Image: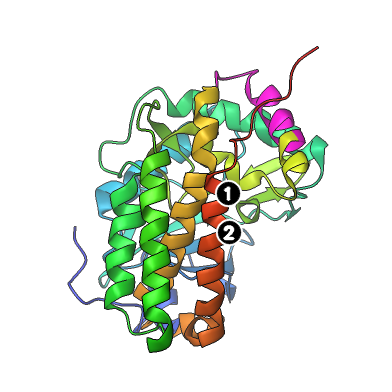
Amino acid sequence: MTTPQGFSFADLSPDLLLDALDSTGIRAESGLLALNSYENRVYQFTAEDGARYVTKFYRPQRWSDAQILEEHQFTLELAEQDIPVAAPLVHNGSTLHHYQGHRFALFPSLGGRQFEVDNLDQLEWVGRFMGRVHSVGQKQAFAHRPTLGLEEYLYQPRRQLEQADFIPDHLKAAFFNDLDFLIREIEQHWDNSWQSIRLHGDCHPGNILWRDGPLFVDLDDARNGPAIQDLWMLLNGERQDKLVQLDTLLEAYGEFADFDVNQLKLIEPLRGLRMVHYMAWLAKRWEDPAFPQAFPWFADAKYWEGQVLAFKEQLAALNEPPLQLMPQW
Protein backbone atom coordinates (compact mmCIF):
# COMPACT_ATOMS: atom_id res chain seq x y z
CA MET A 1 0.00 0.00 0.00
CA THR A 2 1.39 3.43 -0.92
CA THR A 3 0.72 6.79 0.65
CA PRO A 4 -1.12 9.38 -1.49
CA GLN A 5 1.18 12.02 -2.99
CA GLY A 6 1.13 15.24 -0.96
CA PHE A 7 -0.26 13.51 2.12
CA SER A 8 0.78 15.11 5.42
CA PHE A 9 0.17 15.15 9.16
CA ALA A 10 -2.26 18.09 8.83
CA ASP A 11 -5.37 15.98 9.47
CA LEU A 12 -3.86 13.94 12.31
CA SER A 13 -6.36 15.18 14.90
CA PRO A 14 -7.02 13.57 18.30
CA ASP A 15 -10.23 12.10 16.91
CA LEU A 16 -8.45 10.54 13.96
CA LEU A 17 -5.78 9.13 16.28
CA LEU A 18 -8.42 7.53 18.48
CA ASP A 19 -10.30 6.16 15.47
CA ALA A 20 -7.08 4.72 14.04
CA LEU A 21 -6.32 2.95 17.31
CA ASP A 22 -9.92 1.72 17.54
CA SER A 23 -9.53 0.19 14.08
CA THR A 24 -6.94 -2.20 15.55
CA GLY A 25 -9.22 -3.19 18.43
CA ILE A 26 -7.22 -1.21 21.00
CA ARG A 27 -9.17 1.54 22.73
CA ALA A 28 -7.28 4.40 24.33
CA GLU A 29 -8.74 5.34 27.70
CA SER A 30 -6.31 8.12 28.58
CA GLY A 31 -3.14 9.74 27.39
CA LEU A 32 -2.29 10.48 23.77
CA LEU A 33 0.66 12.33 25.22
CA ALA A 34 2.84 13.59 22.37
CA LEU A 35 6.45 12.40 22.77
CA ASN A 36 9.57 14.13 21.51
CA SER A 37 9.63 13.21 17.82
CA TYR A 38 9.72 15.42 14.74
CA GLU A 39 10.25 13.07 11.82
CA ASN A 40 7.19 11.03 12.81
CA ARG A 41 4.36 11.61 15.28
CA VAL A 42 4.64 9.53 18.44
CA TYR A 43 2.11 9.32 21.29
CA GLN A 44 1.90 7.49 24.59
CA PHE A 45 -1.46 6.29 25.90
CA THR A 46 -3.13 3.87 28.29
CA ALA A 47 -5.61 1.35 26.88
CA GLU A 48 -8.87 0.30 28.50
CA ASP A 49 -7.20 -2.86 29.85
CA GLY A 50 -4.67 -0.72 31.73
CA ALA A 51 -1.76 -1.54 29.44
CA ARG A 52 0.45 1.37 28.35
CA TYR A 53 1.39 1.75 24.71
CA VAL A 54 3.33 4.01 22.39
CA THR A 55 2.06 4.51 18.86
CA LYS A 56 4.15 5.88 16.00
CA PHE A 57 2.50 7.46 12.95
CA TYR A 58 5.00 7.42 10.10
CA ARG A 59 5.86 10.48 8.04
CA PRO A 60 4.23 10.19 4.62
CA GLN A 61 6.49 9.67 1.59
CA ARG A 62 9.58 8.86 3.64
CA TRP A 63 9.63 5.06 3.77
CA SER A 64 7.68 2.53 1.75
CA ASP A 65 5.67 -0.16 3.51
CA ALA A 66 8.38 -2.67 2.58
CA GLN A 67 11.06 -0.50 4.17
CA ILE A 68 9.08 -0.01 7.37
CA LEU A 69 8.34 -3.73 7.64
CA GLU A 70 12.01 -4.51 7.06
CA GLU A 71 12.96 -2.31 10.01
CA HIS A 72 10.27 -3.99 12.12
CA GLN A 73 11.56 -7.44 11.21
CA PHE A 74 15.12 -6.50 12.12
CA THR A 75 13.99 -5.11 15.48
CA LEU A 76 11.97 -8.23 16.23
CA GLU A 77 14.95 -10.35 15.24
CA LEU A 78 17.06 -8.47 17.80
CA ALA A 79 14.39 -8.87 20.48
CA GLU A 80 14.27 -12.63 19.82
CA GLN A 81 17.97 -12.71 20.72
CA ASP A 82 17.21 -11.00 24.06
CA ILE A 83 18.75 -7.72 22.90
CA PRO A 84 16.97 -4.84 24.66
CA VAL A 85 15.19 -2.92 21.89
CA ALA A 86 11.83 -1.19 21.65
CA ALA A 87 10.23 -3.64 19.23
CA PRO A 88 6.85 -3.14 17.53
CA LEU A 89 3.95 -5.32 18.64
CA VAL A 90 2.54 -7.90 16.27
CA HIS A 91 -1.18 -7.12 16.45
CA ASN A 92 -3.88 -8.58 14.20
CA GLY A 93 -1.13 -10.44 12.37
CA SER A 94 1.02 -7.41 11.48
CA THR A 95 3.29 -4.73 12.96
CA LEU A 96 2.17 -2.09 10.44
CA HIS A 97 -1.38 -0.72 10.39
CA HIS A 98 -3.22 1.60 8.01
CA TYR A 99 -6.04 4.04 8.59
CA GLN A 100 -7.31 6.69 6.15
CA GLY A 101 -3.95 6.96 4.43
CA HIS A 102 -1.88 7.00 7.61
CA ARG A 103 0.50 4.21 8.58
CA PHE A 104 1.24 3.46 12.21
CA ALA A 105 2.68 0.89 14.59
CA LEU A 106 2.16 0.00 18.24
CA PHE A 107 4.88 -0.50 20.84
CA PRO A 108 4.87 -1.30 24.54
CA SER A 109 5.55 1.79 26.64
CA LEU A 110 9.03 1.30 28.07
CA GLY A 111 10.37 3.95 30.42
CA GLY A 112 13.93 4.60 31.39
CA ARG A 113 16.33 7.29 32.47
CA GLN A 114 18.95 9.04 30.39
CA PHE A 115 22.01 7.09 29.30
CA GLU A 116 25.10 8.67 30.85
CA VAL A 117 27.59 9.10 28.02
CA ASP A 118 30.48 9.79 30.42
CA ASN A 119 29.81 6.66 32.51
CA LEU A 120 32.33 4.07 31.33
CA ASP A 121 30.46 1.22 33.03
CA GLN A 122 27.32 2.08 31.08
CA LEU A 123 29.36 2.55 27.91
CA GLU A 124 30.80 -0.94 28.35
CA TRP A 125 27.28 -2.38 28.53
CA VAL A 126 26.32 -0.48 25.39
CA GLY A 127 29.40 -1.77 23.57
CA ARG A 128 28.60 -5.34 24.53
CA PHE A 129 25.01 -5.09 23.30
CA MET A 130 26.03 -3.24 20.14
CA GLY A 131 28.34 -6.13 19.36
CA ARG A 132 25.32 -8.41 19.69
CA VAL A 133 23.22 -6.10 17.49
CA HIS A 134 25.85 -6.23 14.78
CA SER A 135 26.32 -9.98 15.07
CA VAL A 136 22.64 -10.22 14.07
CA GLY A 137 22.91 -7.39 11.56
CA GLN A 138 25.69 -9.02 9.59
CA LYS A 139 23.68 -12.17 8.88
CA GLN A 140 22.03 -10.51 5.89
CA ALA A 141 21.58 -7.06 4.37
CA PHE A 142 18.43 -4.98 4.08
CA ALA A 143 16.87 -5.54 0.68
CA HIS A 144 14.65 -2.44 0.63
CA ARG A 145 16.35 0.04 2.93
CA PRO A 146 19.25 2.13 1.59
CA THR A 147 22.97 1.82 2.20
CA LEU A 148 24.70 4.74 3.88
CA GLY A 149 26.65 6.75 1.32
CA LEU A 150 27.69 10.11 -0.05
CA GLU A 151 24.71 10.55 -2.38
CA GLU A 152 22.05 10.51 0.37
CA TYR A 153 24.09 12.21 3.07
CA LEU A 154 26.16 14.72 1.10
CA TYR A 155 25.22 15.34 -2.53
CA GLN A 156 21.43 15.40 -2.11
CA PRO A 157 21.71 17.67 0.97
CA ARG A 158 24.01 20.01 -0.98
CA ARG A 159 21.35 20.36 -3.68
CA GLN A 160 18.62 20.80 -1.05
CA LEU A 161 20.51 23.63 0.64
CA GLU A 162 21.14 25.38 -2.66
CA GLN A 163 17.42 25.32 -3.48
CA ALA A 164 16.33 26.43 -0.01
CA ASP A 165 15.89 30.09 0.86
CA PHE A 166 17.46 30.13 4.32
CA ILE A 167 21.06 31.20 3.86
CA PRO A 168 21.46 35.02 3.99
CA ASP A 169 22.68 36.51 0.71
CA HIS A 170 25.83 37.96 2.26
CA LEU A 171 26.84 34.49 3.50
CA LYS A 172 26.00 32.36 0.45
CA ALA A 173 29.36 32.66 -1.27
CA ALA A 174 31.36 31.80 1.86
CA PHE A 175 28.91 29.10 2.91
CA PHE A 176 28.91 27.16 -0.37
CA ASN A 177 32.62 27.70 -0.95
CA ASP A 178 33.44 26.12 2.42
CA LEU A 179 30.76 23.45 1.99
CA ASP A 180 32.21 22.42 -1.36
CA PHE A 181 35.69 22.36 0.16
CA LEU A 182 34.36 20.12 2.93
CA ILE A 183 32.69 17.82 0.39
CA ARG A 184 35.96 17.43 -1.52
CA GLU A 185 37.84 16.63 1.68
CA ILE A 186 35.24 14.04 2.73
CA GLU A 187 35.49 12.45 -0.73
CA GLN A 188 39.26 12.16 -0.24
CA HIS A 189 38.84 10.48 3.15
CA TRP A 190 35.88 8.26 2.24
CA ASP A 191 36.53 4.54 1.93
CA ASN A 192 34.00 2.03 0.58
CA SER A 193 35.97 -1.09 1.50
CA TRP A 194 33.91 -1.77 4.65
CA GLN A 195 31.57 -4.70 5.17
CA SER A 196 27.98 -3.51 4.91
CA ILE A 197 25.72 -4.73 7.71
CA ARG A 198 22.28 -3.86 9.03
CA LEU A 199 22.59 -0.97 11.49
CA HIS A 200 20.55 0.88 14.08
CA GLY A 201 21.55 3.84 11.92
CA ASP A 202 21.07 6.68 14.42
CA CYS A 203 22.61 5.40 17.64
CA HIS A 204 23.19 8.70 19.44
CA PRO A 205 22.88 8.88 23.25
CA GLY A 206 19.29 10.15 23.03
CA ASN A 207 18.24 6.87 21.45
CA ILE A 208 19.50 4.83 24.41
CA LEU A 209 17.49 4.66 27.63
CA TRP A 210 18.81 3.13 30.84
CA ARG A 211 16.72 0.66 32.82
CA ASP A 212 18.98 -1.83 34.62
CA GLY A 213 20.98 -1.77 31.40
CA PRO A 214 20.66 -0.11 27.99
CA LEU A 215 17.46 -0.04 25.94
CA PHE A 216 17.88 0.85 22.27
CA VAL A 217 14.96 2.80 20.82
CA ASP A 218 13.91 4.32 17.49
CA LEU A 219 15.40 2.30 14.66
CA ASP A 220 13.60 4.54 12.17
CA ASP A 221 16.92 5.33 10.42
CA ALA A 222 18.02 1.68 10.18
CA ARG A 223 19.99 1.01 7.02
CA ASN A 224 22.99 -0.87 5.67
CA GLY A 225 26.41 0.57 6.43
CA PRO A 226 29.71 0.24 8.30
CA ALA A 227 29.67 -0.82 11.95
CA ILE A 228 31.39 2.40 13.05
CA GLN A 229 28.21 4.35 12.19
CA ASP A 230 26.55 2.89 15.31
CA LEU A 231 29.54 3.70 17.53
CA TRP A 232 31.08 7.06 16.69
CA MET A 233 28.16 9.17 18.00
CA LEU A 234 28.76 7.71 21.48
CA LEU A 235 32.18 9.42 21.67
CA ASN A 236 32.37 12.89 23.19
CA GLY A 237 34.78 15.34 24.79
CA GLU A 238 38.44 15.91 24.04
CA ARG A 239 40.54 13.51 21.98
CA GLN A 240 41.91 11.69 25.03
CA ASP A 241 38.36 11.24 26.38
CA LYS A 242 37.28 9.77 23.06
CA LEU A 243 40.22 7.37 23.04
CA VAL A 244 39.26 6.00 26.46
CA GLN A 245 35.60 5.74 25.43
CA LEU A 246 36.49 4.05 22.15
CA ASP A 247 38.70 1.53 23.91
CA THR A 248 35.91 0.76 26.40
CA LEU A 249 33.31 0.37 23.66
CA LEU A 250 35.34 -1.84 21.36
CA GLU A 251 36.75 -4.12 24.04
CA ALA A 252 33.18 -4.95 25.08
CA TYR A 253 31.97 -5.02 21.46
CA GLY A 254 34.67 -7.56 20.60
CA GLU A 255 33.14 -10.13 22.94
CA PHE A 256 30.36 -10.67 20.37
CA ALA A 257 31.51 -9.32 17.02
CA ASP A 258 34.74 -8.57 15.19
CA PHE A 259 35.45 -4.92 14.46
CA ASP A 260 37.53 -3.75 11.50
CA VAL A 261 39.83 -1.07 12.96
CA ASN A 262 40.26 0.40 9.47
CA GLN A 263 36.77 1.84 9.92
CA LEU A 264 38.10 4.26 12.56
CA LYS A 265 39.23 6.55 9.77
CA LEU A 266 35.56 6.99 8.81
CA ILE A 267 34.64 8.74 12.07
CA GLU A 268 35.34 12.30 10.94
CA PRO A 269 33.95 11.81 7.41
CA LEU A 270 30.76 10.44 9.00
CA ARG A 271 30.61 13.44 11.33
CA GLY A 272 30.85 15.71 8.29
CA LEU A 273 28.08 13.79 6.52
CA ARG A 274 25.82 14.10 9.55
CA MET A 275 26.48 17.85 9.78
CA VAL A 276 25.48 18.52 6.18
CA HIS A 277 22.56 16.07 6.21
CA TYR A 278 21.13 17.63 9.39
CA MET A 279 20.99 21.12 7.87
CA ALA A 280 19.28 19.83 4.75
CA TRP A 281 16.85 17.77 6.83
CA LEU A 282 15.70 20.90 8.67
CA ALA A 283 15.33 22.80 5.40
CA LYS A 284 13.37 19.97 3.80
CA ARG A 285 10.98 19.69 6.76
CA TRP A 286 10.47 23.42 7.35
CA GLU A 287 6.91 23.42 6.00
CA ASP A 288 5.95 21.04 8.81
CA PRO A 289 4.67 23.44 11.54
CA ALA A 290 6.49 21.43 14.22
CA PHE A 291 9.89 22.43 12.84
CA PRO A 292 9.76 26.27 13.04
CA GLN A 293 8.42 25.88 16.58
CA ALA A 294 11.17 23.48 17.66
CA PHE A 295 14.10 24.97 15.72
CA PRO A 296 13.47 28.77 15.44
CA TRP A 297 17.22 29.45 15.31
CA PHE A 298 17.43 27.72 11.92
CA ALA A 299 16.07 30.85 10.20
CA ASP A 300 18.50 33.14 12.05
CA ALA A 301 21.56 34.54 10.24
CA LYS A 302 23.70 33.75 13.30
CA TYR A 303 23.05 30.04 12.81
CA TRP A 304 24.42 30.14 9.26
CA GLU A 305 27.42 32.20 10.36
CA GLY A 306 28.10 29.47 12.89
CA GLN A 307 27.88 26.79 10.19
CA VAL A 308 30.61 28.49 8.15
CA LEU A 309 32.83 28.27 11.23
CA ALA A 310 31.74 24.66 11.86
CA PHE A 311 32.80 23.71 8.32
CA LYS A 312 36.29 25.06 8.99
CA GLU A 313 36.50 23.16 12.28
CA GLN A 314 35.40 19.94 10.60
CA LEU A 315 37.96 20.42 7.84
CA ALA A 316 40.64 20.64 10.53
CA ALA A 317 39.30 17.48 12.21
CA LEU A 318 39.40 15.58 8.91
CA ASN A 319 43.10 16.32 8.61
CA GLU A 320 44.00 15.14 12.09
CA PRO A 321 45.23 11.56 12.57
CA PRO A 322 42.26 9.16 13.01
CA LEU A 323 41.49 7.81 16.46
CA GLN A 324 43.31 4.58 17.22
CA LEU A 325 42.88 1.94 19.87
CA MET A 326 45.21 2.25 22.84
CA PRO A 327 48.05 -0.31 23.01
CA GLN A 328 47.27 -3.44 25.01
CA TRP A 329 49.84 -4.48 27.64
In the displayed structure, 66 sits above or below 254; it is: below
Instruction: State left or right for residue 55 relative to residue 46.
Output: left
Question: Which residue is painted at 26% across and 36% down in the image?
Answer: 143
Q: Specify the amino acid type for callout 1.
A: Ala
Q: Which residues are magenta?
A: 244-259
Q: Along the line of sight, which residue is nearer the eye, 286 or 158?
A: 158
Secondary structure at badge 1 equals helix
Q: Position of residue 89 (x, y in %)?
A: 47, 48
Q: Along the line of sight, which residue is nearer the eye, 285 or 14?
A: 285
Instruction: State left or right for residue 162 relative to residue 240.
Output: left
Question: Which residue is painted at 19% across and 61% down in the image?
Answer: 2
Q: Is residue 82 visible?
A: no
Q: Circle 1 is placed at which residue position?
A: 317
Q: Position of residue 147 (x, y in %)?
A: 32, 41
Q: Specify the amino acid type for callout 2.
A: Glu
Q: Gap between marks 2 and 1, in whole Å? A: 6 Å
Residues at circles 2 and 1 in contact by the CB criterion of under 8 Å: yes
Q: Magenta segment: does it hold 180? A: no
Quadrant where the N terminus is found in the figure:
bottom left
Q: Circle 2 is placed at which residue position?
A: 313
